[in-house]
Amino acid sequence: MKNKDKLLYVSAAVLAAGSVAGVKTTNVKAAEVKQADVNANSKLDLNKADKIAQTQIKQDTTSVQKTQDQLKQDQTAKTQAESAKTEAQNTLLAKENIVSNAQTKLNQAKQELTQTQAQNKDLHAQYDTTTENAVDMAQEAEKKLDQKVNDLSGQVQNAQNKQTDLLGQRTNVEGEIKTNTETLTNVNEQLNKARAEQTEAQNHFDAVQKDYVPIQNEYNAKKSAADKAAQDLKQNETDLAQSQKQLADLQTKNNDLAKTVNNTQGQLDNANKDLANTKTDMNQSQAKLNDVQKQNSDVNGKLTSAITKRDQAKSTLDSQSENQTKIVITPEFNKAFHKWMDIHDLNHVTLTSENKAEMVKELGDLSKQEAEMNHFESNAKDKEHKIDMMHLTYEDRLEANKFGINLVNQIRTQMGKKPVKLTVGSLKYANDVAKYYEADYPTSNFGIDSVNHDTKAIDKALVENGVKPGMGGEASSYGTYYDSDLDGRFGSFSIKNMDDLKHEIYNAVTGWMFNYEQEEWLHASIVTSMNMWDNTNYKNHNEEDPTYFGFAIMANAPHEENGAMAGDFSIGLETIVDNTIPGNPLSHPIDYNKFNVKDVISTDNSDSSQAGQVYASAQNEVNTLQGQKTDLDNQIKSLNDHITQSQTRVNDLTKTITDLSAKLANAKTEQGTVQGQIGQVSKHVDELKAAQPALIQANDNTVNALADYEQTHATVLNDYNNAKSQLEQANNKLQSATKANDEAEKVLNQNKAKLAHINQELDAVKAQLADLTTKLSDAKSSQTSAKANLEKAQADYDNYVNTHKDLIDSIAKSDKELADKEEAVRVAQADYDKASQEYKAAKKEADKLANKVKDLDQSIAKSQETIKLLNNRIASNTQIIENNKQVHAQAAKLAARKAFDAQINKALDNVVYGTKTISQHTAKAATVKPAVSTKNTKHALPQTGANDKLSLFAALAGLSLSSIGLGSLVLDKKRRRN
């Protein structure tokens, strides 16, 4: 067979193998390549769709969390509002009864008042008021006249006082006038003397002036020349001193400017250096901030997933615990408790005497809310389970322990702690503690009034159960299960069945956790294994050592106590932490042959227990991530603050550099100006110094010439100056005397006018006093008559009273009764008004709470619908991402197939086909040599014998194309399904 024929044979075999798969080879190749290209082009769109879906999931998850938080708040608020609503409705009913009773009392009081008023009116109608009215009128007349006499007496006294005062004033003014007259006489004498002396001085000056006039012009000219020369010399000296000072000031200023230039240049250099360093530091901080923000973004994503996981676990746990008695811990209490009691919490605050009040206020307010929110739910089956506190069976204690440990684990799970274990060993240990307590306190309240905790009993139970003494913890609660008088006639049991006992355990646990009344939360720390009872591993605080709890339930027989009969009981939470670790100084080895920890007693259904562990693990993860987020947020805040501060520093330095540059330029400019001024002033100083000798000589010459002239005419000049001085003194003396005379006349005239005014007032007062005296006399006469009238009227009234004593007593009694009835009506009206106001307030509060419950129902329904819609959208987007993952995987496969197809197609391109078309449905039309059998073409291999290598290649190529056809068919089916 020729090579060409062999190649044709191979082509036919390959195509035959491909056609058996039912797909045309060339068509398969083209379809696969096209599909691969399409997937490559849409890859970016798929990635974008993934990002959009992931972003939406993240946003919806956050929204779900916020809505769930709001839903929880609304549900809690609704519970509180419904409770308050019931209480308000009860209060409203009570207030309504109070209003009704108050209305009845008011009506009765008004009725009694009406009757009393009628009786009182009849009695008063029998009484004759004539004599009594006469007494009243006489008393009123006497009272008015007494007042009139008193008023007139006062007015007379005032007028007399004023007259005395005016007489004293007149005497004083008359004395002053006498003194003023004498003063004026003396002043006139001084004035006449001054006038004579002035006339004499003027005459003398006129005579001397005749000799002075001829030499006056010459003398004035010489004196003016001397004054000018002295002034010129003084001015030059002043200018020289000022210029020298100006020069010194300019030189000092020049030195200061030189220092300013040097200092400013140094400051400018330092500011530029600081600016460069600050920008470098800011760039480094920005780089670190970018890194921390990236870490924060990663943690945020993990935290969102962790919260979703936590909430799903919580929802699962809640759904599995629907029929259990619950203790709900709010996030607010959880956060505050960790803050104060969890020494490993990132926000932990160490308790001190200074911040204790803050802790008590925060935990106290939240604990009160928790206590009011959590309530025990009774169980009908437990009520049928009768128990005897003095003879509890093992089964009784076991059931009570399961219930109590379940409550404890509910709290621990919600607070991020692992559930504790109730084992056969921890139950036996708790029962032993109860047994030894009962032995130590057969007739008292288990040491509550003295030691609080029986360490002797606890240590004895520890040793018997293989634990080192002193290593057991305990939280206890006390009460009485039986109370009676000493005779036992009124005895009653408060714990009669398992429901009663579980109720006491519930109260004990909530009392430990929410002890706001005693402001104490150390017992809560025992329940949660925090603070001094921390159970975290000492090497790894993210792990907890195995912790075993049990409830010790103890009771003693009824006995006499405080004057009555009582049966005491106590509930103790007994705790042991297994921290047996080599090298741990706090480790206390446990003898496991005595303390059975292998046989764990289930306190809940397995699904719920497992769900609790899953929730606790998820909560721990949330707590850890929240701590990391808080730390990263703090770093981001610190870095942002630092960058802000650095930017502020950059801005300040930039401004400083600008200011310093301007200051430096100004200083240099000013320095040049000052140096120019120094040259000018120096030149001026030299000029002033040069002019000084000539000015001194000129001054000396004029002074000498004036002195010579004065010496020649000394007599005339001296006489003139003396006469001038005497005349000036005489003029001054005359002026002073004239002024004194005017002042004395003015004072005298003022006092004369004052005396005339006083005399006028005295005349008026005398007339007033005479009139008032006459009126007073008339009033006293009328007063005497009024007193007589009053005595007669009083006698008539007394006679009437004596003859009508019974009637008057009846009226007084009736008046008192009427006052009492009026007071009763006033009190009843006030009580009714108060009751009505309280009723209206109670009704308003009840309506308000009813509306609040209605609003909360709407809000809850809206939140539930929102959560449902968001969860559906999260599921849809999650499905989109999963579908896109399959599309990505398919695209990768198609890309690989494209490369493989290219290799096969390259090989096929080298094959020479026959002239006839190959059928899609059969290989019979292919150009195949007769030597090949066509009975079983699906499995037949070419048999040439001439070229084994060529035969092997044909076989492999046929099988490859066959697999390609089958694979493409499968992919097509998958694409159709998707």
Image (cartoon, helix red, strand yellow):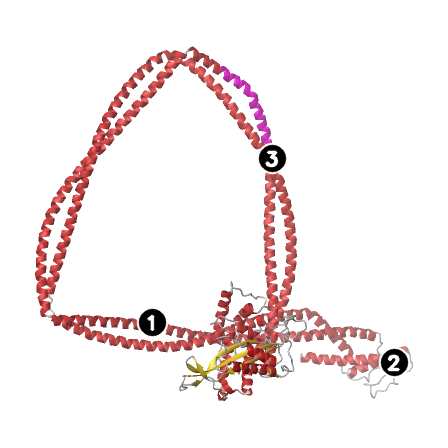
Name the residue tied to disc 2: 951
Name the residue type under label 2. Ser
Reading the image, the residue beneath label 1 is 837
State whether residue 587 is above or below residue 235: below
Can the viewer see residue 818? Answer: yes
Residue 180 appears left or right of 959: left
In the displayed structure, 289 sits above or below 958; it is above
Separation of residues labelled 2 and 3 (CA atoms): 110 Å
Q: Which residues are magenta?
A: 674-701
* Viewer-closest of 199 and 345: 345
Q: Residue at x 55, y 20 (%)?
A: 691
**Quarter of the view holding residue 540:** bottom right
Magenta-drawn stretch contains 868 = no
Residue 686 part of the magenta segment: yes
Can you give x and y, in whole percent of width and height, for residue 79 in the image?
47, 76
Mark yes or no: residue 403 visible: no
- Residue 303 at x, y percent in the picture: 61, 70
- Amino acid carrying label 3: it is Asn
Dot 1: element? helix
> Of helix, strand and loop, which mostly describes the magenta segment?
helix
